[in-house]
Image: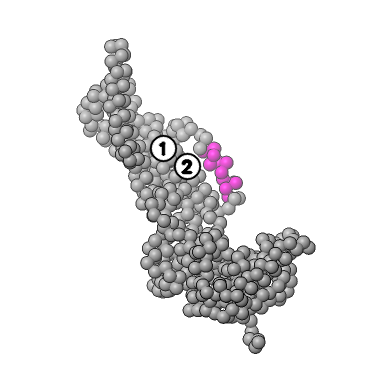
């Protein structure tokens, strides 16, 4: 395998603790290439969300170094977009205004905002819903608005913190497929935190299985299934084998007592 | 019968019952005491006969109530923004706000008369003092009770403090503000009448002033007509606020239940 020259994200022995609390992340070393889709999976308390917050630059590393696109996380903030576990929509704004919110906060002029927001809406297949209020949408649609809002920034790196965790199985699978379809059109490096092994295997080319107390990278699993992935991918032997392997790893760290 | 027809029809059916009961009590009273409870038709007659006097008093009281109410909205908005800044500011100022609320406003009336003179200004100030507290408390609560996920969204997007207040905190506080406004709307006419009662003058006589005149002159049907006029003012204020609240919130707020999803 040929190694690409410079990674877009590099963790160098990163450690994190909050105040005088226990170590949350312990010597995380890992680098991601621009075309990577990295899923992070592990028991609760393994520091998955903390990992994303370090990347987003809202929380500083305690020790070690984190380099994003050759810069510090604070400096690289403009190149990132974050999708939360909750849709976090402003209930008093219509869908189109919600999608444009982050652009508005960045001071993008109204006309440009409308054009960019419109593209993001189409990308998330929400055309026709632009004048709706969030309370008129289903859970899956709200999540799409949230996704469209993040995509409107044309990020280099997309951070997703269990975005589909609250959805039913059907909507989740559907949105997984659409997420990959969007990624084929607008390329970004993905960091995707999830509790679902099936979702991690379906989406990613790399899966980080983490262990807790303190959070460490227990094992990395490469997923060599070809893109584009379709519903048929979920029935392939290779997919099922990987799901079994990651599940086994996850069980081993769940029962691991330091 | 649908819930809506029930809500409209039942009160309409109750009206004749209540009026009948009223006449019954009038009939049962000893003849020399009937003067103390005028019958509904006598009140109606007084209302029509004294309509010019009542209407001008109604306008005066309404103007005082509106001025005090609007002043309370403006001042409470600034106060709430100040109080929402930090727990420190709240801790330092809340006790004094409580003291103001615990002081019966009527007791302040003599001071107000000395400061600004009897009449419209005093009436408006008394209304203001009665209305301001529920507005400040509710609006402050709204400004500090924003969904923490949304605050996180704004912080992560590096939104400025100004953007956070204008685009997030103020709209999120609107439902709370309207709760305060509904309470204030019922208090404003009461405040204006009480104000007029204690600090009114004959030049700009309002409903409170008329009450004193009528009761001193044993004009009980007119007294009851004044009560009805006060009541109408209350309905006008409350109705107006309910309408505004609907305009501002019905698109998105849960309190105006959604039919579709």
Q: Which of A91 and A111 is in front in this view?
A: A91
* Foreground pick, B71 / A186: A186
Locate residue B133, reporting x and y percent.
Answer: 48, 41
> Separation of disc 2 and disc 1 at Cα?
10 Å
Crowding at dot 1, Cα within 10 Å, few <14 / some 14-19 / many 20+, comes out as many
> Are the residues flagged by discs 2 and 1 from a single subunit?
yes
Q: Is residue B179 visible?
A: yes
Residue B167 is situated, as x and y percent measured from the top left of the image, at 47, 60
SS label for mark 1: helix
Image quarter where the C terminus of chain B lies is bottom left
Height in image: B13 above or below A236? above
Give the residues drawn in magenta, as a range: B89-100
Q: Where is residue B210 in the image (x, y as percent from the top left)?
A: 31, 28
Relative horizontal placement of residue A151, taking residue A64 as reference (left or right) = left
Q: Name the residue under label 1.
A: B187
Whether tag 2 and tag 1 are in contact, CB under 8 A, the answer is yes
Residue for point 54% across, 39% down: B98
Which residue corresponds to the image point at 46% horizontal and 34% vertical from the top-left? B105
Give yes or no for residue B98 being in the magenta stretch: yes
Is residue B160 something that shows in the picture?
Answer: no
Q: Main secondary structure of the magenta part?
A: helix
- How was this image coloured? one colour
């Amino acid at each position: 395998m040929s190694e690409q020259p410079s990674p877009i994200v590099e963790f160098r022995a990163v450690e994190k603790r909050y105040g005088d609390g226990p170590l949350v992340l312990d010597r995380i070393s890992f680098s991601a290439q621009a075309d990577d889709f990295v899923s992070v999976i592990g028991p609760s308390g393994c520091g998955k969300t903390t990992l994303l917050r370090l990347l987003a630059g809202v929380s500083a590393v305690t020790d070690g170094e984190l380099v994003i696109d050759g810069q510090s996380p604070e400096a690289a903030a403009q190149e990132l977009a974050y999708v939360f576990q909750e849709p976090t929509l402003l209930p008093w704004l219509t869908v189109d205004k919600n999608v444009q919110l982050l652009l508005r906060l960045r001071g993008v002029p109204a006309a440009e905002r409308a054009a960019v927001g419109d593209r993001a809406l189409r990308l998330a297949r929400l055309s026709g819903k632009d004048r709706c209020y969030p309370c008129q949408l289903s859970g899956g649609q709200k999540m799409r608005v949230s996704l469209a809002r993040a995509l409107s920034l044309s990020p280099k790196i997309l951070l997703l913190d269990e975005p589909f965790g609250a959805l039913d199985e059907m909507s989740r699978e559907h949105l997984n497929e659409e997420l990959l379809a969007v990624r084929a059109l607008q390329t970004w490096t993905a960091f995707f935190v999830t509790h679902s092994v099936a979702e991690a295997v379906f989406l990613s080319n790399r899966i980080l299985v983490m262990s807790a107390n303190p959070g460490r990278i227990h094992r990395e699993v490469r997923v060599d299934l070809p893109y584009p992935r379709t519903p048929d991918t979920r029935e392939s032997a290779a997919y099922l084998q990987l799901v079994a392997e990651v599940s086994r790893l996850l069980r081993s760290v769940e029962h691991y007592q330091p | 019968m649908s819930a809506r027809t029930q809500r409209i029809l039942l009160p309409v059916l109750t009206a004749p019952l209540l009026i009948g009961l009223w006449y019954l009590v009038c009939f049962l009273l000893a003849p020399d005491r009937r003067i103390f409870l005028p019958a509904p038709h006598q009140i109606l007659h007084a209302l029509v006969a004294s309509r010019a006097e009542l209407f001008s008093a109604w306008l005066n009281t309404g103007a005082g109530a509106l001025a005090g109410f609007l002043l309370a909205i403006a001042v409470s908005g600034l106060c709430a923004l100040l109080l929402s800044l930090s727990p420190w500011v709240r801790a330092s100022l809340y006790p004094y706000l409580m003291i103001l609320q615990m002081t019966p406003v009527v007791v302040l009336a003599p001071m107000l008369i000395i400061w600004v003179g009897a009449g419209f200004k005093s009436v408006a100030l008394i209304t203001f003092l009665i209305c301001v507290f529920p507005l400040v408390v509710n609006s402050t609560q709204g400004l500090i009770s924003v969904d923490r996920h949304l605050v996180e969204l704004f912080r992560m997007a590096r939104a400025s403090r100004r953007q956070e207040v204008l685009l997030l905190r103020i709209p999120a506080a609107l439902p709370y503000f309207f709760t305060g406004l509904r309470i204030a709307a019922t208090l404003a006419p009461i405040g204006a009448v009480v104000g007029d009662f204690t600090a009114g003058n004959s030049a700009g006589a309002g409903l409170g002033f008329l009450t004193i005149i009528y009761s001193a002159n044993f004009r009980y049907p007119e007294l009851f007509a004044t009560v009805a006029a006060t009541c109408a003012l209350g309905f006008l204020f409350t109705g107006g606020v309910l309408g505004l609240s609907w305009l501002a919130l019905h698109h998105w707020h849960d309190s105006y239940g959604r039919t579709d999803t």
